[in-house]
Each structure stands twice: as C-alpha cells, then as structure tokens.
Amino acid sequence: MHWFIVEQHFDSQLYPYHLYMDVYGNGFKDIIGRNLEHICIFYEDGNFTQMFEKDDWKVHGEAALKQITLNANEIAKRARLGIEKLFVAGHNIRNATLGELSNKELIKIVKRFNEAFISAARWGIIFPAAEYENYLVSKYIKSKIKARSEQLTIEVNFADAFEAIIYWPESTYVNKEKEDLLRIAALVGNIETELKTHTEEYKWISFGFQGPELDYEYFKKTLDDVKKRGETLEIAKKTEGEMQRKKEKYLDLLRFSQEEKEYLSALAELNFLKAFRKDAEFHGNYALSFLFKEIAKRFSIPLTHSRMLLADEIINALETGKIDRDELAKRSKKFVLLYEKGNRSLHSGESAEAFRKLIPIENIIEVSELNGDVACRGKATGIVKVVHGKSDYDKFNEGDILVSIATNPNMVPLMKKAAAIVTDIGGITCHAAIISRELGKPCIIGTKIATKALRDGEKVEVDAEKGIVRKIS
C-alpha cells in the first residue's frame, strides 16, 4: 500500500480527535456508500502523523464527490446543524461547574459532546473528503467554468472566476474577531473594558488541541498593529462587497441558470462550513480542557494522561471508577491508532514502534523555485520560517514567510504576522486559502515540497500572482 501523510498535528490529543477517524472508518457508508478502509495515526511525544492510503482515499473522495453533486444543499444543511450542536455542547461544558457534578452527570455531558462532535464530523467532512489531496470539488467547479466559457466563447480568468464563485458572504470566527477589533479601533477614549470583553469572547479561536488561550495582551498588541496599518471596518466591508459583486458578475457572465447558481451556492457554503467546523472544533477543544482537568483530578492522573483516553474509555472510567494508569502512561509516549476495514485497534508504547515504517520518508529537495496554486493574490519578500508545531512559534517574526505542511486555526496569530503563506498541501478551499483571503495575505498552496525545499533563514520572493516561490541569493 502507498501511505501518504494527510496532516501532522503537534501538542495533540487522542480525544476527541479519534472521533473523526471513527467516522472515516465506520460512519460514512450509509451516506456515501463506503467507509475509508485504511487509516493510520502514529503518535509520539505529542505529535500526530495522520496517514491514509492513496488509492483508498482517491476512491473515497470520488464517492464523496458523487454524493455532493446529488445532495449539496442537504449536506450543507446537516453540516451546519451539526456544527451548531458542537458549539452548544462546548458552551455547556464551559458553563458547567464540573467539580460539583457527579460522575453520572459528567457522563451525560460527555455523551452530548460526543453526539454533537460526530454529527458535525459525519456531514462536515464529506466536502473535505472530496477535496483534500485530489481537489475533486475544485476541479469539478473549474470544469464547469471552463465548459461554459468555451460554449459562450468568452475569455475568463479561471483563477479569478473560481475564487469569486466559491466566495461565501458569511464570516468565520477569525474574520468576526478581526471585524470586532476594527470596531474597537474606531472608538474614542478608554477602550480597556471593550477589549477585555473582546478577549473573553475570542480567547479560544486559535486554541488548537491544548492551547494556550489568547490573552488581553495579545489582542491589545493586535489592536495597536491594526491602527498602525490604518485598517478600518469600512475597508474590510468594502472588500467583502467587492467579492460579492464579482461573484454575481461571473455567475451572470457565464449565464448559469438559477438552478446552477443555487447548486454553486451550496458548494460555496460547504467550503465555508469546512472552516467554520474548525472554529467549532477549536471551541470544543477549549471547553474540553476543563473536562480533562476534572478527569485528571478525579482519578489522580497527570493532565497529559487524561487526554489519552478514547471516548468510551472516559465514560467507562466515570461509570466504574477504574482507569488503566499503566496504559495511559504508555500512550502518552507513543501509540498507533489503526483502522483496517472498519476494525479499530490501538497499539501503545513499544508495540507501536513497528508501525513507524509506514511513515513516508521525506527527503530534502534542492530547487531554486517551486510552484503551487494561488490562494490569495499578492507579492511579498521575506525570511522563511518553517513551522511544524508550537515549538516553532517563538522563532516567527513580523514579516516572515510562513511555510508549513498545512495551516490550522492554531496558526492564525502567525498568519497575521506573516508577509506571505506557503503550504505543501491543500486546495483552493483549504484553511490556508480561506484565512489568507480573509487576512489579505499573499498565499500559495499545494506546492507539495515547500517544507522540504525551503529552510529557515532563506530569503524568498512569494509571487502569488503566478504561483511561484523563488529563492533570493
């Protein structure tokens, strides 16, 4: 089999991440006709390497695309409901005084969270399943644009048209936070109270798996930077209005029927919901941080070990009062979570070592320039900083070029500081693409080799007009 690395996560945890894999391995057949047959998660010292098998993933993506072409509106509707449930479940944990709840009451909270998380995952990751790695949805939309432009003999900038058509007018929490901060920036006088309220509202938006949460000083510095750059809410809203007008222009220019417009709108909403689900997931992880502390306290185990429980193990521990401390100690160092045709197995400690050979070997590549897809237009020059996880965050400075396998909400503070963003993987609907457009940062995605071809300290030019990254000697 040909395994490939889907994602790498740092400072990660088994719960609730494994619920996504449970859905991929056992929760898709009744929706798209098949489950993913081969999944491998290799964990060591806080680092997750998630791998799928190439052919299995391609077939799975094609099955997901088929369902999307048939039921895009229904999938979007159900995905949104699941995401909203997940936000509610997270708020329920945050609002509860966990220390005063009985084990039985705590079980109810955990079960509700599990149900909401699985609901958001089952419908929310159909779109990524079709898009990730093989970019099937992007190719499908682009083929529609190309066919219609040729039919009408109209010259169209395909990248521009695609970006406009996939635009959705709703904001992720990253953009909501930015707009609220711009409102505060426009206020006159003492804004300390407003900024404290803002901090409380958005401190979780880049929480990742284990935090930390953003604090008052972070938002104060961000506010000062916004003022220095002269950003205003009026400018931000103007940009959003221009994108909406551009979208309407292309839809009319290409003479899509009302039915086609509604279908393309559903695809744009699914693209947005992909990022919105990440917001819900990070909010949920923030809420779960309080649950993990309570479990660690009740069972007298290290906090890091409480994060190594499967969902059913959490419930069983609360029901029986028993927990396998030795197993959790092994998992905290190393484990493999494997799915083979619906069968899940977990191998901890040294027994997991044999699976290391499944991880593809990544060699350093010598090139003077590399190519990718333009996610957000623009040009920038700066110093490369390759970021894999939190241990790399402190080295990142204002104006650096952010290079990563892929971005996630935990990297948003870095994305705000970056002069440009370059990733190995992801299509035009990936997190880096969505957030870079919201932030107005030049971004090139899908280079496949950026983290292997670029090194810290190198100076590069990111030409996100042509999709080229050039090393500058």
Image: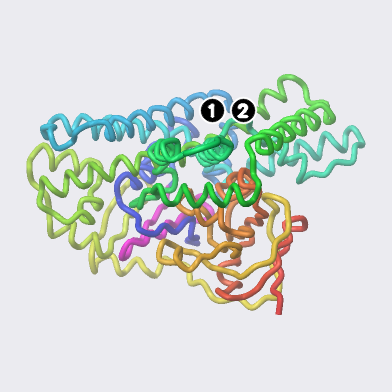
**Residue corresponding to mark 1:** 76
| Residue farthest right in this picture | 153
Instruction: State the count of labels.
Output: 2
In front of the other: 298 or 120:
298
Q: Is residue 10 above or below residue 273?
A: below
228 vs 9, left or right, is right
**Residue 121 visible in the current orientation:** no
**Percent of width and height locating residue 287:** 31, 40
**Percent of width and height locating residue 222:** 52, 50
**Residue 80 visible in the current orientation:** yes
Q: Residues within 10 Å of mark 1 (few under 14, many from 20)?
A: many
Which residue is located at x 67 percent, y 75 percent? 367
**Residue corresponding to mark 2:** 266
**Percent of width and height locating residue 73:** 58, 24
The amino acid beneath tag 1 is Ala
Q: Is residue 174 above or below residue 116?
A: below
Stretch of the chain drawn in magenta: 37-57
Q: Which mark is residue 300?
A: none
Q: Earlier in the sequence, mark 1 or mark 2?
A: 1
